Image (cartoon, rainbow, N blue to C red):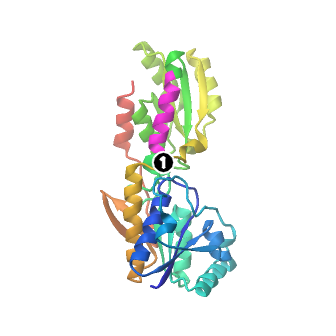
Amino acid sequence: MKTIAVLTSGGDAPGMNAAVRAVVRTACENGIKVYGVIRGYNGLINGDFIEMDLRSVSDIINRGGTILYTARCAEFATEEGMRRAVRTCQEWGIEGVVVIGGDGSFRGARDLSERGIPCVGIPGTIDNDIACCDYTIGYDTCLNTIMELVDRIRDTTESHDRCSVIEVMGRRAGYLALNSGIACGATAILIPEVPFDIEKHVIERMKKTQRADKKHFIILCAEGVGVDVKALAAEIEAKTGVESRATILGHTQRGGYPTAKDRIMATRMGNYAVKLLMQDIGNRVVAAQKEEVLDYDIFEALNMKKNIDMNLYNVAHEVSI
């Protein structure tokens, strides 16, 4: 390939810039022209491109968010929108596209590949919910951010003998809640993959730990469980007598400097994606498994199911009494 493009799509994730940097520099070092697409598939439809070189990506490896910006694109979900994107790629001489994002972004990459524009997906999402991948870019940074924020909340929770009910991101996946709950010593962790009963899994656990002379509590809720954390805090206070407060961490979880793990994995994945396109290989998703980088067919990747580690879930509650 002589010309490729790179875009970021869906929710931003720390480490996306490191992946963009790796794509651009790998392409440049191999004599390939590379365009950065502004605002995801919107930019691909409208030809909102910037030609990138080695210096275009200087000093971005440490930055959160994405210098290419990101947006969701309803038009691209239509047949006409996809045809416009294909025509734009053809007009600009773009022979392949690297798509950095989550499963929705990969569906777009699959649709483009089917229409003759080879695409390679790189998993960039804080949710860690890409089934073919043990680890997605942005997850480690987000997890560490949550840990730091919950630690700060714990200081005041402990000082006032309170219960803090904290909602974290993750969409329909509970990986952030489960692992941050372990890292922060949460008394109870509510995730969408495991059915729960508030009385049994929260109230009774708190009363049990109260009998062991515990006086402050952290309850971690994944946003995907659909629990109103303010209502839950009120219920806890009414049934246990423990003053309770609710906190929704929100978009503070998305930002910040990416961790070393995210920067390194993003760099490896970005380099790998370009090497696939250099071999005229598209319709693939780059994946990280057991510290190795490999790739899957997009159709196969999208049909995979990712299951929560129930042993880890059980460990979390055995050690949090």
Query: Which x, y percent locates residue 229?
Result: 61, 33
| Relative to 307, 67 lies left or right | right
- Asked which quadrant contains residue 321, the reply is top left
Return the x and y of residue 315 as percentages of the image width and height: 34, 35
Residue at the image point whose x is 46% and y is 50% from the top: 258
**Residue 107, image x and y in percent?**
54, 69
- Label 1 crowd bin: few (<14), some (14–19), many (20+), radius 10 Å: some
Measured as percent of width and height from the top left, residue 9 is found at 57, 63
Residue drawn where x is 40% and y is 35% of the image: 183
Residue bounds of the magenta highlight:
142-155
Is residue 143 rendered magenta in the image?
Answer: yes
Instruction: Say if residue 228 shows up in the picture.
Output: yes
Q: Is residue 49 magenta?
A: no
Is residue 65 placed above or below 242 in the rendered structure?
below
- State whether the magenta stretch is mostly helix, strand or loop: helix
**What residue appears at the point 55 percent right and 66 percent down from the top-left corner?**
105
Identify the residue under disc 1.
257
